[in-house]
Image: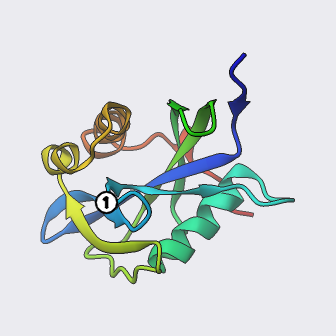
């Protein structure tokens, strides 16, 4: 049997950078690969509270415009012999959002969809980015997806 873990959340930050919508990717120290924001849900937190905290910890972005992306990442972690199911969120940022990375990442880039897919090594990341691009960049995000941060 393979256990299923759902204690991790992830988030895609979107910002208009020099007039073009982009998504944030960061190069992770552990593993040396490009990814989006992610982290574990701590004791007593909801999923949305965890991603708000992770966004601020990893990038110094204060999430005020948060959405449920209506997408679940899923992948097998061989080292732990488990399947991870990860709820994805989107944070809409002001234009030219400033980023300050924490110690988990060495660099960051604001990317269009093609650039993000070229940097990210995992096929499931590509699917997440395509979904986000379709439902949050090419279309206006539905208010039904908005997370009430109260």
User: Residue 81 appears at what percent x and percent y?
Assistant: 62, 30
- Image point (33%, 75%), residue name: 106
Residue toward you, 84 or 131: 84
Could you tell whether 78 is left or right of 92 in the image? Answer: right
Mark yes or no: residue 148 visible: no
Please say if 66 is above or below 75.
below
* Residue at the extreme front of the image, as rendered: 79
User: What kind of element bears circle 1?
Assistant: strand
* Residue at the extreme top of the image, as rendered: 1
Looking at the picture, the colour scheme in use is: rainbow
Q: Quadrant of the C terminus?
A: bottom right
Please say if 125 is above or below 51.
above
User: Residue 77 appears at what percent x and percent y?
Assistant: 54, 35
Residue toward you, 56 or 67: 56
Toward which corner of the image does residue 101 lie, by quadrant? bottom left
Please say if 87 is above or below 23.
above
Residue toward you, 118 or 138: 118
Q: Tell me the residue that label 1 is attached to.
A: 25
Q: Quadrant of the N terminus?
A: top right
- Image point (56%, 76%), residue name: 57
């Amino acid at each position: 049997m393979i256990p299923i873990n759902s204690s991790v959340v992830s988030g895609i930050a979107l910002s208009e950078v020099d007039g073009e919508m982009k998504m944030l990717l960061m190069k992770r120290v552990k593993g040396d690969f490009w990814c989006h924001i992610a982290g574990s849900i701590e004791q007593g937190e909801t999923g949305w509270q965890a991603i708000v905290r992770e966004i601020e910890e990893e990038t110094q972005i204060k999430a005020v415009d948060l959405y449920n992306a209506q997408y679940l990442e899923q992948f097998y972690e061989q080292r732990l012999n488990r399947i991870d199911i990860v709820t994805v969120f989107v944070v809409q940022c002001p234009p030219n959002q400033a980023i300050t990375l924490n110690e988990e990442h060495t660099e960051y880039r604001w990317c269009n969809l093609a650039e993000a897919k070229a940097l990210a090594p995992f096929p499931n990341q590509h699917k997440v980015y395509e979904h986000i691009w379709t439902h949050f960049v090419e279309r206006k995000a539905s208010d039904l997806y908005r997370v009430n941060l109260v």
